[in-house]
Image (cartoon, rainbow, N blue to C red):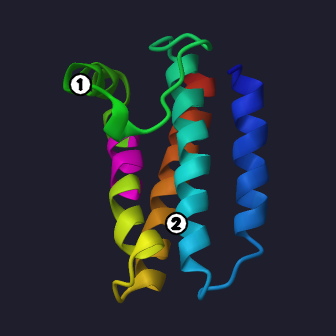
Amino acid sequence: MQIDAHIALARRIETTLRKLGHADYEMQIEGAMLAGTHWLNVLLHRVGTNPPAQDVFHTYLLTINEFRRLAVAADQPIHALAEIEDIRPPFVRGNVPGGEQAAARALELLARLRTAALEAAVTA
């Protein structure tokens, strides 16, 4: 996917996230994962690590070697997305207490991903 398309989708998801309340933690976590994936791909495309035809869909689908290769270019962002993905199962599919706090953490990690992607535009 082209960078502009990733940006448009990430921003659209983030617009929707701003409409949610604290009790909507499942959707906040899910949205953070979806938008965060787009922001990670923006970053990886901008720094030339992955071409537009090669997107990351989920960090847990990457081989260990591929995860390590991407971490060289974007260590904190790829780990941020991995953490959001790790938060997701117990709170989106399960009934673990603390969903609102987990959503707040996911949104914090999403903000870091967005910042990294946008800063890559300045330095690339």
Q: Is residue 36 above or below residue 2?
A: below
* Residue type beneath disc 1: Arg
Sort mark 1 into few (<14), some (14-19) or many (20+) by Cα contacts within 10 Å.
Answer: some
Q: Where is residue 84 drawn, in percent x and y? A: 41, 57
Image quadrant where residue 87 sits: bottom left
Segment colored magenta: 77-84
Outermost front residue? 93
Q: Is residue 60 above or below residue 47?
A: below
Q: Residue at x 35, y 47 (%)?
A: 82
Q: Residue at x 32, y 44 (%)?
A: 79
The residue wearing badge 1 is: 68
Image quadrant where residue 49 sits: top left
* Residue type beneath disc 2: Ile
Residue 82: in magenta span? yes
Q: Residue at x 56, y 58 (%)?
A: 32
Q: Where is residue 58 drawn, in percent x and y? A: 43, 39
Whether residue 23 is visible here, answered yes or no, is yes
Q: Is residue 10 left or right of residue 70?
A: right
Q: Which of the two labelled residues, at mark 2 and mark 1, occupies the earlier sequence position?
A: 2
Single out the mark in the foreground, 2 or 1. Answer: 2
Say which mark, if any, is on residue 29: 2
Q: Nearer the viewer, residue 122 or 63?
A: 63
The quadrant of the picture occupied by the C terminus is top right
The quadrant of the picture occupied by the N terminus is top right
Q: Where is residue 92 drawn, in percent x and y? A: 47, 71
Q: Where is residue 104 drawn, in percent x and y? A: 48, 74
